[in-house]
Image (spheres, rainbow, N blue to C red):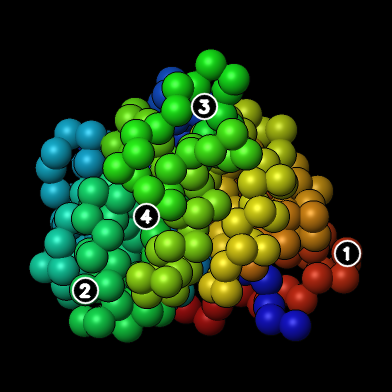
């Protein structure tokens, strides 16, 4: 069995780490480089840096902040937010990222996934899916979406631009499609659960995990250590991403790892030697 990963997340806005609830009501959580250094020392398996307003504001990712973060960590770093082209991907990789995450741009131009995978390898391309449960009053999607369109059986819809714009795309079908296009990993965030500290959307996580052949990172909703275990066990995730429980000192990464290892999961518990 492959080792399960614990991944702290830095949601960055205006150069500061922030944390919100369902993508709104943001509050400050600290300096990204300082937090990154702490998580590297504590034994985080990877680190995700998301410039959460870059797409909505139609601007580029803050490369100077990415460089500062990459200089402080020795664990794999994934960077996303505002990446719209292969050249943007190249700039982030040159700035110190090991992987790039695309969301809005990939929905707008599916070929970006293919081009990125061809240039840098599938392992470098992470597709972020921000999904929200469909309510009964949701209108049917446009026929132009074809096989990706929402149907009466759909459970979750894909959102873009930092959760601001609905797409009419079925989240599970989109997960399957991005893997066909060359994505090496999926970062799956439940907008409904994000920041509520009541647990991941296990049904969503399981639906995507069972539908694709690449690793799925569960994101959104971790409030205690059992929530992490549930994401691995019931959600069948390959990795869990968390922010609030680490940023505000509820738990350390090592506490999380020791708990999960005691529950029988394969976990790397030795902090990185850096």
Residue 255 shows in the view:
no
Dot 4 or dot 2: first in sequence order is 4
Per the image, the residue denoted by label 4 is 49
Q: Distance between the Cα atoms at labels 2 and 1?
A: 41 Å
- Counting residues from the N terminus, which is met first, the one under dot 2 or under dot 1? 2
Quick one: 88 or 109, which is closer to the camera?
109
Q: CA distance from mark 1 to mark 4?
A: 29 Å
Tell me the quarter of the picture where residue 196 sits.
Answer: top right
Task: State the SS at label 3.
Answer: strand
Residue neighbourhood size for the residue with mark 4, other residues' Cα within 10 Å, grouped as few (<14), some (14–19), many (≥20):
many
Point 57% across, 67% down: residue: 212
Observer-nearest residue: 96 or 205?
205
| Residue under the point 71% across and 39% down | 199
Q: Which residue is mark 2?
A: 115
Q: Is residue 154 above or below residue 146?
A: above
Q: Name which of mark 4 and mark 3 comes first in the sequence.
A: 3
What is the tally of numbered marks visible in this picture? 4
Q: CA distance from mark 4 to mark 3?
A: 18 Å
Question: Closer to the N terminus: mark 1 or mark 4?
Answer: 4
Q: Residue at x 69, y 55 (%)?
A: 206
Looking at the image, is mark 3 or mark 2 earlier in the sequence?
3
- The answer to which of 179 and 252 lies nearer the viewer is 179
Choose mark 4 or mark 2, whichever is in front.
2
Front disc: 3 or 2: 2
Cα separation between marks 3 and 1? 29 Å
Find disc 1 in the rendering and name its residue: 263
Quadrant holding the N terminus? bottom right
Q: Where is 89 relative to 235, above or below?
A: below
Residue 262 x %, y %: 88, 66
Under tag 1, what secondary structure? loop
Q: CA distance from mark 4 to mark 2?
A: 22 Å
């Amino acid at each position: 069995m492959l080792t399960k990963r614990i991944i702290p997340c830095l949601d960055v806005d205006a150069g500061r780490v922030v944390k919100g609830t369902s993508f709104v009501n943001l509050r400050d959580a600290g300096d990204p480089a300082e937090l990154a250094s702490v998580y590297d020392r504590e034994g985080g398996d990877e680190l995700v840096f998301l410039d959460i307003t870059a797409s909505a504001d139609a601007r580029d990712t803050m490369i100077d902040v990415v460089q500062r973060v990459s200089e402080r960590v020795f664990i794999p770093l994934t960077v996303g937010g505002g990446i719209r082209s292969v050249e943007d991907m190249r700039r982030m990789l040159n700035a110190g990222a090991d992987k790039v995450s695309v969301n809005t741009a990939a929905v707008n131009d599916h070929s970006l996934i293919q081009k990125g995978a061809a240039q840098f390898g599938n392992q470098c391309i992470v597709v972020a899916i921000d999904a929200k449960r469909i309510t009964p009053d949701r209108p049917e999607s446009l026929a132009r979406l074809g096989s990706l369109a929402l149907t009466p059986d759909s459970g979750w819809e894909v959102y873009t631009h930092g959760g601001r714009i609905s797409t009419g795309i079925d989240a599970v079908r989109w997960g399957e499609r991005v893997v066909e296009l060359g994505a090496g990993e999926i970062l799956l965030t439940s907008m409904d659960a994000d920041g509520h500290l009541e647990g991941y959307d296990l049904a969503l996580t399981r639906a995507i995990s069972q539908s694709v052949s690449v690793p799925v990172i569960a994101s959104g909703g971790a409030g205690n250590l059992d929530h992490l275990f549930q994401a691995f066990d019931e959600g069948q995730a390959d990795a869990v991403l968390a922010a609030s429980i680490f940023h505000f000192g509820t738990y350390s990464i090592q506490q999380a790892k020791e708990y999960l290892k005691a529950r029988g999961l394969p976990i790397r518990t030795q902090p990185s030697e850096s």
